[in-house]
Amino acid sequence: MKLRRTTVFSMRLPEESAKRLKRIANRHGWTPSEASARLVEEGLRRSEFAFVDFRDSAAGRQACIQGSSLAIWEVVLLLRGYNGKVSSAAKHLRWPEAKVRAAVHYADAFPAEINEAIADNASVGFETLRRMLPQAVDFDTARAGRS
């Protein structure tokens, strides 16, 4: 989530909230101002889009579908595999169609964010993955079918 033009907006926080904000900022390497802007933006997006939540991941903070382990870009990628057919993706995920549509609505509103995440995912090959996850095993479905 990249913020474009900014404006100064002053607010008062309870002391304990300010301490918690500083801890979050430190954890992510942000300034308290960056952390507060990010959290406000995420809160606004949560209120504007059904089933959307934000989580930390190895790739940074990502928009996800509530009640699942999937980032919105992953739902969009799956949906592309089903040629955009919401009902097929929903059946695959065993979700109500409304959750898949929620991912579509979010992706439509923030296409650059979603497309960037999909491109980042596509750029990681098996060798890169194996360096990050030494337990990863290359599984060849063609060979597996012959055993």
Image (cartoon, rainbow, N blue to C red):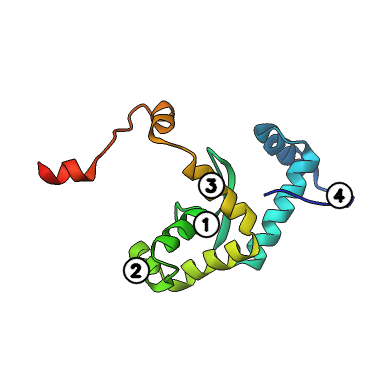
Q: Is residue 67 visible?
A: no
Determine the CA span between mark 3 and mark 1.
14 Å
Determine the CA span between mark 2 and mark 3.
25 Å
First in sequence: mark 1 vs mark 2: 1
Query: Does the residue at mark 3 contact the one at mark 1 (Cβ under 8 Å)?
Result: no
| Mark seen at residue 119 | 3
SS state under label 2: helix
- The residue that appears at 29% across and 33% down in the rendered structure is 137
Query: Does the residue at mark 2 contact the one at mark 3 (Cβ under 8 Å)?
Result: no
* Residue identified by numbered label 2: 91
* Residue identified by numbered label 4: 12
Determine the CA span between mark 2 and mark 4.
46 Å
- The residue that appears at 37% across and 62% down in the rendered structure is 93
| Mark seen at residue 72 | 1
First in sequence: mark 3 vs mark 1: 1
First in sequence: mark 4 vs mark 3: 4
SS state under label 4: loop
Query: Looking at the picture, how far across and down is residue 13, in whole percent?
Result: 82, 48
First in sequence: mark 4 vs mark 1: 4
Amino acid residing under circle 2: Lys
Name above or below for residue 1 compared with residue 133. Answer: below
Query: Looking at the picture, how far across and down is residue 61, in whole percent?
Result: 60, 45
Query: Does the residue at mark 2 contact the one at mark 4 (Cβ under 8 Å)?
Result: no
The one nearer the camera, 123 or 65, is 123
First in sequence: mark 2 vs mark 3: 2
Amino acid residing under circle 3: Ala
